Image: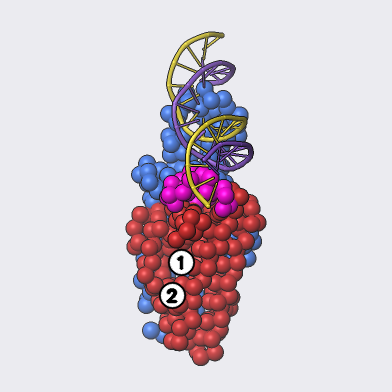
Chain colours: A red, B blue, C purple, D yellow
Amino acid sequence: MDTAERLIKSTQELLWERGYVGTSPKAIQQRAEAGQGSMYHHFTGKPDLARQAIRRSADELKDAAERQLGGDGRPLDRITAYLRRERAVLRGCQIGRLTQDPDVVASPELRDPVDETFRWLRGRLAEVIREGQSTGEFALTVDADDLAATVAAVLQGGYVLARAADNDEPFERATRGLVQLLRAAATSRP
Amino acid sequence: MDTAERLIKSTQELLWERGYVGTSPKAIQQRAEAGQGSMYHHFTGKPDLARQAIRRSADELKDAAERQLGGDGRPLDRITAYLRRERAVLRGCQIGRLTQDPDVVASPELRDPVDETFRWLRGRLAEVIREGQSTGEFALTVDADDLAATVAAVLQGGYVLARAADNDEPFERATRGLVQLLRAAATSRP
DNA sequence: GTCTATAATCGGATAGAC
DNA sequence: GTCTATCCGATTATAGAC
């Protein structure tokens, strides 16, 4: 792995662990085992490096989500598989955590990939839900775009609750509660 | 309002806007219109001040939640009222945002009030849900503690999605989707 | 209680040598 | 491409005067 690549990877990790305001160029350089000169040769500065790291993380998140959502099972099973996927819960979401960073939301350059990622995720979830509505697996009484936002929110909120408790349990409860609700709602009479 | 009080209030606001790592003693002093000497006279340092500010915010959150959850309406209506309460969505949750702060989760002193707040909230929601299950408003097929976590997670995740989009819409969708699911699940046949 | 002075360290870079 | 030197402001205090 070359220097520029190591710098991006280190920045991804630090943004995940400490956020943008909590991450210094020096910390990035040390983790990447690169000198200051190298960093400022390959990137114009911290915002530039962060921009590229965030784009990389966004792509990784989309790929990982598509692995469950794009499967060939039934829609409800794919959503359930996505919710139940093995996750490092206490680390939180590398993209979602950036929404709490004042410097990220204030900068269009940094917020754009975050915005785009969740927009894509909600759209993709809504597609799967609509598919399930056409087969009768999902209740027709619930708007697909609303429900997609609910599913994405349970994950993001599950991370928040787990980190507050320093324990995976609230995350597991939140996702399990949602799956139970989805199953119960599927068989409902409008 | 005396100086110590203004310092706490300013710290609450800054923790909400910028988090712990993003908030400096100097910024707190300026917002409170207090000098350095005053701040270090009343508090031992930034962690002490943050601790007191977080406790204050936690109490405020609990009071606000209890206003809807402790009403005398039907359980489903109280949960719905809590979800639909007027909120400054784009500001996010003053307590939830702290879970993304590395220095907060690393310090028991600072994380404890956050943990306690969400523990209380989930417990309170579970009580209301159990009440609703006994009256048939909530499906018995769903575990009350799980569902309570789901409800809390939708709110916390709704904030995340809204801040990513710089728009209230995803929050409104997420909460609306949950309300629709709750209604649909209530009438389900196990 | 509040003020000003002082200080060690960090943050985020630029400049020029190699 | 990478290294070292240098810079200026911010961070998080402490000390002592008023």
Q: Examine the rendering and report whether any part of residue B142 can be seen.
A: yes
Q: Where residue B98 sits in the image (x, y, percent)?
A: 47, 49
Q: Main secondary structure of the magenta part?
A: helix
* Residue drawn at point x = 53 percent, y = 25 percent: B36
**In this figure, which residue is indicated by the disc labeled 2?**
A82
Q: Which mark is residue A96?
A: none
Residue A155 tag number: 1
Q: Which is nearer the eye, B85 or B178?
A: B178
Image quarter of residue A120: bottom right
Q: Given the image, on which type of amino acid does mark 1 rest?
A: Leu
Who's the residue at 43% across and 49% down the image? A33
| Quarter of the C terminus of chain B within the rendering | bottom left
In percent of width and height, residue B147 lies at: 41, 68
Is B107 or A134 nearer to us in this picture? B107
Indicate whether B157 appears above or below B102.
Answer: below
- Residue type marked 2: Tyr
Magenta span has A22?
A: yes
- Residue A166 lies in the magenta-colored region: no
Seen from the viewer's position, the closer of residues B90 and B22 is B22
Instruction: Check the image and report above or below for A121 versus D8.
Output: below
As helix, strand or loop, the secondary structure at mark 2 comes to helix
